[in-house]
Amino acid sequence: MKQVEVYILSGFLGAGKTTLLQNILSEEQQNHRKIAVVMNELGEVSIDSNMIPEETPLKELLNGCVCCTIQGQLEVQLENMLREYDLDAIYIETTGVAHPIEVLDACLSPLFAEKLEVKAILTIVDANRWQNRTGLSIQLRKLLIEQVEHADVVLLNKVDSLSENEKAKTVSEIQSINPTGKLFMTEFARIPLSSIQINKMNKKQQHEQAHVHKHLHLRSYVHTFAHPIDLEKFEDFLREMPDTIFRIKGYIRFSHSKESFLFQYSYGMPLYMKEPVNRKQTLVFIGENLDHSMLQKQLNTLVI
Ligand SMILES: Nc1nc2c(ncn2[C@@H]2O[C@H](COP(=O)(O)OP(=O)(O)OP(=O)(O)O)[C@@H](O)[C@H]2O)c(=O)[nH]1
């Protein structure tokens, strides 16, 4: 099945996300690819959506941040997009205060495991803002760093206002936070698409139901159980799990009951909610350095 590419555009307020999106869309149009955009704004109206060409399918998520209050709405909008259009890629422009992990998390719903492929988190950094970040609150400074830390590609934008020395200093600061991501200096977010579109994963890795994001630092693993599992063993598994697994979500059934559950796990807290529809028992794991074969082996032992 064809997977639709997903790119998450992150970056602090005013860093240049919309400018980047406009550049991307015009190049994608020249390449004749079918693109859709999801725009998330904290306010009740979207200003930036007017910048998107009319022919581009657009869904707006207003009045909340997709990484927290309206995460569920993103799932609904992605589902609608996939139903309504035959797409090559979806670009998600997040609010300037979104945590990229949480947005990634929303895109990795088990509902989309076979339909979407998250290709990259692109973070755009306002060079001036970065230089003056000490003026921000600790929380916002932390957010700025997290946006850089989890990016696959970082664009250091607005470098027109930096001296050569300032550029060198900023580049080395960013590289020390994110040594493996690609880093580009840009003006008005001008960058060729080929630099930000990371090559597809190879077919071999698609095998064994491992939904691998080869180029993301954060990775996901999708596991489907053929039979209900043992609750006690599952809870032992959760207790012993490495803390580099940040998030688990999906549908699950236990051997002691006929019911289906929506299972959510984040920051050490598991949550089970009864699920009225009997769904495929698929769990999505998100974390760093996930050992897929080890996980698979451990999860297989939970089935009785
Ligand atoms: N001088 C300069 N200005 C830039 C550059 N890139 C973008 N801008 C300007 O910065 C302002 C904010 O850019 P946007 O693309 O709207 O930023 P954004 O990240 O989408 O903003 P929010 O959606 O509000 O978070 C606009 O006025 C841009 O024209 C650059 O490289 N240099």
Image: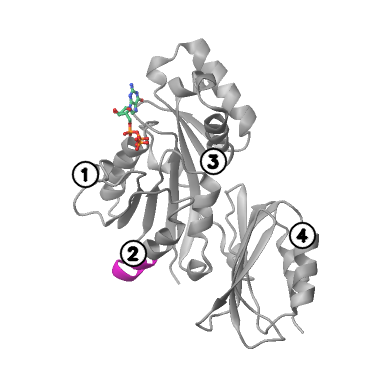
Q: Specify few, some or many for label 1: CA neighbours under 10 Å numbering under 14, 14-19, or 20 or more.
A: few
Q: For ligand 1, which image quadrant applies?
A: top left
Mark toward the start of the polypeptide (1 vs 3): 1
Q: Quadrant of the N terminus?
A: bottom left
Query: Which residue is tagged 4?
Result: 241
- SS of the residue at dot 4? loop
Spatial CA distance of label 1 from label 3 is 27 Å
Query: Which label belongs to residue 81?
Result: 2
Q: Amino acid at mark 4?
A: Met
- Residue 138 seen by the camera: yes
Magenta residue check for 80: yes
Q: What whole-number distance in Å separates the C-alpha atoms at marks 3 and 2?
A: 25 Å
Q: Which residue is mark 1?
A: 50
Q: Disc number at residue 73?
A: none
Relative to 39, 223 lies left or right: right
Query: Which three-letter amino acid code belongs to the residue tagged 1?
Result: Asn
Residue at disc 1, CB closer than 8 Å to ligand 1: no
Relative to 254, is 219 above or below? above
Prevalent SS, magenta region:
helix
* Magenta stretch, residue numbers: 79-85
Judged by depth in the image, the label closer to the viewer, 2 or 4, is 4
186 up-or-down from 290: above or below? above
